[in-house]
Amino acid sequence: MSEHPPATDAPRGALPGALYVVATPIGNLADLSGRARETLASVALIAAEDTRHTRSLLQAFGIDTPLVSLHEHNEAARLGPLIERLQRGEAVALVSDAGTPLVSDPGFGLVRAALDAGIKVTPIPGPTAAVAALSASGLPTDRFAFEGFLPAKAGARRTTLAQLAQEARTLIFYEAPHRLGEVLVDMAEALGPERRASIGRELTKRFETMYYGTLAELGQRVKQDADMCRGELVIVVAGVDPAQAPPLASDVDKVLRTLLDELPAAQAAKLAARITGEKRAALYERAVQLQK
Ligand code: SAM
């Protein structure tokens, strides 16, 4: 008995009045699935992030379905007409320039509006750079957090990274290649230089390369290897190892408060330093603040 249902069980062609969220290749055209092809060929209309980009994809597969643009600047205006066409019974596909729509790409507004209007929304799964990079990262995959793009400005980026310092799940980031060097420095600073990480560059394309190491090692390597900063990339970083994690500020306060119930500030700070590994002077200052 076959483990897989026969391919003919899957609905063929597009159902009338359904919105299909179709994943497209992230570089290698051979990654367009059979169902994606079939769906793109049989819907009445394709809403695409960039119609010129998608037209050349369609041409490669001999598909001539009409296209309409749907990007962050016109999504609000496009929703009404698209929902009307769906309600009239036309099948519509949603695609972005690469990978899975809505994953750091437009489409959320259309999917939400379609669901609110009672329209059937069907995913046609396929490539997404985040999961491709994770699958080859060698880092734990049982729990992960997709962070998309970090803020471009250094201050906001460091704040976001500091907030992630205690995250135990594997972290996945998209990043612009020209910022890789500075981002690795910020990551090493906020998450610790010994954190294991991997970088997936130009996945599925001719110059696909996976880089592995600690944040400090990868940061050093960027300085010597200009290729690392070329093309598209995903950074995957191990979550914090709970055994190695520095104590949370709230945990330190808890220890200090307990000791302060019984001891003067100086002694409480001395003992708290032994328990938490934090600096005694800083703990003394904090103890005095807490006493107030
Ligand atoms: N929707 C896409 C997906 O499902 O992966 C992501 C779109 S987002 C605008 C583009 C970012 O995805 C790039 O800057 C890069 O971080 C990542 N990316 C896309 N294609 C990639 C590839 N072939 N190799 C590595 N990273 C890629």
Image (spheres, rainbow, N blue to C red):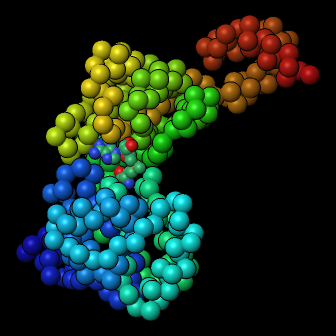
Residue 88 position (above or below residue 233):
below
Percent coordinates x, y for residue 124 in the rendering: 30, 69
Q: Quadrant of residue 18?
A: bottom left
Residue 67 position (above or below residue 71):
below
Asked whether residue 34 is in view, the answer is no
> In the visual, does 146 lie left or right of 57?
right
Q: Give the residue at x 61% y 25%.
A: 247
Quarter of the image containing the N terminus? bottom left
Q: Give the residue at x 61% y 33%.
A: 156
Q: Quadrant of residue 113?
A: bottom right
The residue positioned farthest toward the front in the image shown: 52
The one of 105 and 190 positioned closer to us in this rendering: 105
Residue 210 position (above or below residue 11):
above
The one of 167 and 117 positioned closer to us in this rendering: 117
Q: Give the residue at x 44% y 29%.
A: 179
Q: Give the residue at x 48% y 71%.
A: 111
Percent coordinates x, y for residue 34 in the rendering: 17, 69
Quarter of the image containing the C terminus? top right
The residue positioned farthest toward the right in the image shown: 292
Percent coordinates x, y for residue 100 in the rendering: 35, 59
The residue positioned farthest toward the bottom in the image shown: 88
In this rendering, the count of numbered labels is 0
Asked whether residue 15 is in view, the answer is yes
> In the visual, does 226 lie left or right of 84?
left
> In the visual, does 268 lie left or right of 203?
right
